[in-house]
Image (cartoon, rainbow, N blue to C red):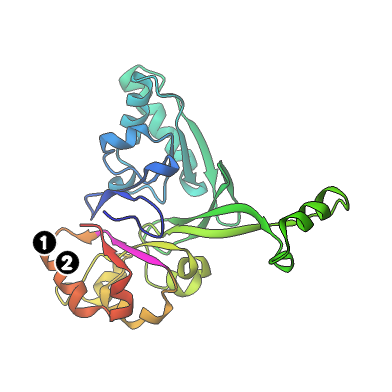
């Protein structure tokens, strides 16, 4: 897959089967599916919700990291699933007779987690049939104050060293937004979903084989709804995921080519 808005993205996502979005350069993944082997290397997993196709491989991830001496993994979970998540591990510890060591972090909308390397994770609520949250990854960097742009380097240095002037400001940029399973109103409700440099959005159903009403009842996005809101996508790049298994790869690409408006199609990639 080409780099999207400067980011390397791997993984797989098939509706109801398995979703795991791997960001190897950031050393983390969104959801874990059945846990692709490459994702065992990721020390941080951010979970959107507790459906099996998004969380099923977590115990295997913990056990395999322990076996390979890869260090303690961090699992970020929605607050609504925290207690049951630990009950799941308690059951597996009894069955497997091992410690399955990990660090659990419960996080919810309005909170943030410092991931290190100038990166913050901030959840937002995703409307689905069970409690679900997406995540925005924000980069935090210091940059030269805009009013000092164009000044000679010597003058900037003088202001900093001789006058004790603060010559930089902290700038936050929404790099990646991952919605998890959601209905389309997430696009209108959450500004960061529209503004993130890279948006990773599920589009489970693509045509009349499943109606918009049926799609919404299942808590998912239909391509019809995307087309109707094409002007809202301010992102540099959009990765569409979670296509129903009823669509073949060639069908997905043909339908997107035919139905997406040219401006949106130009920045859209399908994870197929």
Residue 214: numbered disc:
none
Quadrant for the C terminus in the image: bottom left
Seen as rendered, the residue at the extreme top is 97
Give the secondary structure at mark 1: loop
Residue 69: x percent and y percent? 39, 19
Structural crowding at the residue carrying mark 2, measured as other residues with C-alpha within 10 Å and reported as few (<14), some (14–19) or many (≥20): some
- List the residue tagged with mark 2: 252
Marks 1/2: CA distance? 6 Å
Residue at image x 48%, y 58%?
175
Residue 241: x percent and y percent? 28, 60
- List the residue tagged with mark 1: 248
- Residue 237 colored magenta? yes
Q: In the rendered structure, are the residues bearing label 1 and label 2 in contact, judged by CB atoms less than 8 Å apart?
A: yes
Q: Main secondary structure of the magenta part?
A: strand
Residue at image x 43%, y 38%?
85
Q: Which residues lie in the magenta part?
A: 236-242
Left or right: residue 208 versus residue 234 is left
46 to 72, vertically: above or below: below
Q: What is the quadrant of residue 178 in the picture?
A: bottom left
Residue 135: x percent and y percent? 47, 55
Left or right: residue 4 versus residue 169 is left
183 to 24, vertically: above or below: below
């Amino acid at each position: 897959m080409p780099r999207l808005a400067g980011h390397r993205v791997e993984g797989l996502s098939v509706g109801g089967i398995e979703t795991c979005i791997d960001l190897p350069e950031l050393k983390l993944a969104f959801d874990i599916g059945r846990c692709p082997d490459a994702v065992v290397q990721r020390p941080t997993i951010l979970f959107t919700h507790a459906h099996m196709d998004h969380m099923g491989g977590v115990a295997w991830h913990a056990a395999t990291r322990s076996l390979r001496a890869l260090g303690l993994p961090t699992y970020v979970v929605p607050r609504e699933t925290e207690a049951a998540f630990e009950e799941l591990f308690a059951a597996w510890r009894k069955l497997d007779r091992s410690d399955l060591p990990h660090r659990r972090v419960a996080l919810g909308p309005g909170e943030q987690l410092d991931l290190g390397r100038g990166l913050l994770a901030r959840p937002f609520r995703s409307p689905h049939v069970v409690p679900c949250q997406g995540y925005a990854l924000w980069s935090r960097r210091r940059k030269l104050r805009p009013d000092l742009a164009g000044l000679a380097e010597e003058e900037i240095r003088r202001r900093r060293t001789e006058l004790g002037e603060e010559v930089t400001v902290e700038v936050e940029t929404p790099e990646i937004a991952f919605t998890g399973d959601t209905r389309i109103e997430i696009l209108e409700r959450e500004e960061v979903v529209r503004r993130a440099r890279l948006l990773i959005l599920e589009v489970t159903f693509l045509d009349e084989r499943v109606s918009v009403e049926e799609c919404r009842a299942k808590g998912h996005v239909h391509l019809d709804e995307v087309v109707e809101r094409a002007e809202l996508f301010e992102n540099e790049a959009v990765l569409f995921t979670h296509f129903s298994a009823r669509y073949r790869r060639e069908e997905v690409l043909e339908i997107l080519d035919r139905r997406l408006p040219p401006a949106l199609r130009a920045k859209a990639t399908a994870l197929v």
